[in-house]
Image (cartoon, rainbow, N blue to C red):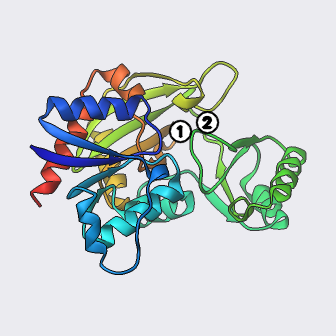
Amino acid sequence: MKTICLVSDRIRWDEKALIHAASDNGVKLKLIDPKTVFLSVSGDLSRLKDSFSEIVINRCVSYFRGLHITAILEKAELKVINPFYVSLICGNKVFTNLALISAKVPVPKTLVAFTKEGVLKALDEMGFPAVIKPVVGSWGRLIALIKDRDSAQAIIESREQIHNALLQIYYIQEYVERPPRDIRVLVIGDEAVAASYRYSPKDDWRTNVARGGISKPCRLTDELEDLALQAAEAVGGGVLAVDCMESPRGILVHEVNSTVEFRGLCSATGIDIPGKIIQYAVRMMKR
């Protein structure tokens, strides 16, 4: 029986679905909780192969925890889904944006500033409303819609008081006039396997399912499929969620997620996404 490791610091619906999918596909899934282990990074790293399998699915909720674990496992010559480079790029919105524009993937107008003065200058150029995001973060946390200069100053002052170096990097995007939804496309390897609309919950402009957003089926058109595959290739490929917005100038990609939550996609489309992830991991063993 083939064995795959699942590294996760929280067992959510998605991880439970992967456990069941592994069983259905005749795969033994070895669970490892990174909160309860330590890894030696001195001496012969190949000894880690005794504790892990050839293929490791890393689904740590903590971006930095997962990133460091992946770096160590890859040095031990284990294959990780997703690889270190991909996780590094997708976990930082600036790095993701740079990868996308290098591949000529359409993105919203984006500015980056590093001080209060720089942010205000950037907003003067961008115009209001605008969206300010943390460069590292998920589930729509600390994302703010800035409607005027006064609200911008209040948000900047709040960030300055937190004394977090990452929050001193200001990622500013245009507010895209769009329907009250975005589109999530799941890419596994070289295939776009599913797409859903994510609708904003009541009294919130953000579409994150973690914040109460609702997923509905979305037809995977040739245009959407090509764009998602182009974006996934730009960041290095793997199991990725490509988030898009419908704008007056066409579909724009605003984020690519490396640790994909797929419950909403499964419920909206009925596609066996956990099974496809397990099958992808099995195929990786043969490479």
Q: Amino acid at mark 1?
A: Pro
**Who's the residue at 38% across and 62% down the image?**
70
Left-right relation of 161 to 10: right
Residue placed farthest to the bottom in the image?
43
**Who's the residue at 29% across and 41% down the image?**
225
Left-right relation of 176 to 32: right
Kindly indicate the quadrant of the structure image that contains residue 142: top right
Which residue is at the front of the view, 72 or 126?
72
Q: Amino acid at mark 2?
A: Glu
Q: Is residue 87 above or below residue 25?
A: below
Front disc: 1 or 2: 2
Q: Secondary structure at mark 1?
A: loop
Q: Secondary structure at mark 2?
A: loop
Using the image, tell me which numbered label, if any, was put on residue 140. none
Q: Is residue 223 above or below residue 12?
A: below
**Residue 85 visible in image:** no
State the image coordinates of residue 243 (x, y, percent, origin top left).
Answer: 45, 42
The quadrant of the picture occupied by the N terminus is top left
**Who's the residue at 47% across and 39% down the image?**
10
**Who's the residue at 28% across and 53% down the image?**
56
**Residue 285 visible in image:** yes
Task: Specify few, some or many for label 1: CA neighbours under 10 Å numbering under 14, 14-19, or 20 or more.
Answer: few
State the image coordinates of residue 78 (x, y, percent, origin top left).
Answer: 25, 64
Residue to which mark 2 is pinned: 177
Task: Specify few, some or many for label 2: CA neighbours under 10 Å numbering under 14, 14-19, or 20 or more.
Answer: few
Which residue is at the front of the view, 225 or 7?
7
Which residue is at the front of the view, 182 or 235?
235
Residue to which mark 1 is pinned: 248
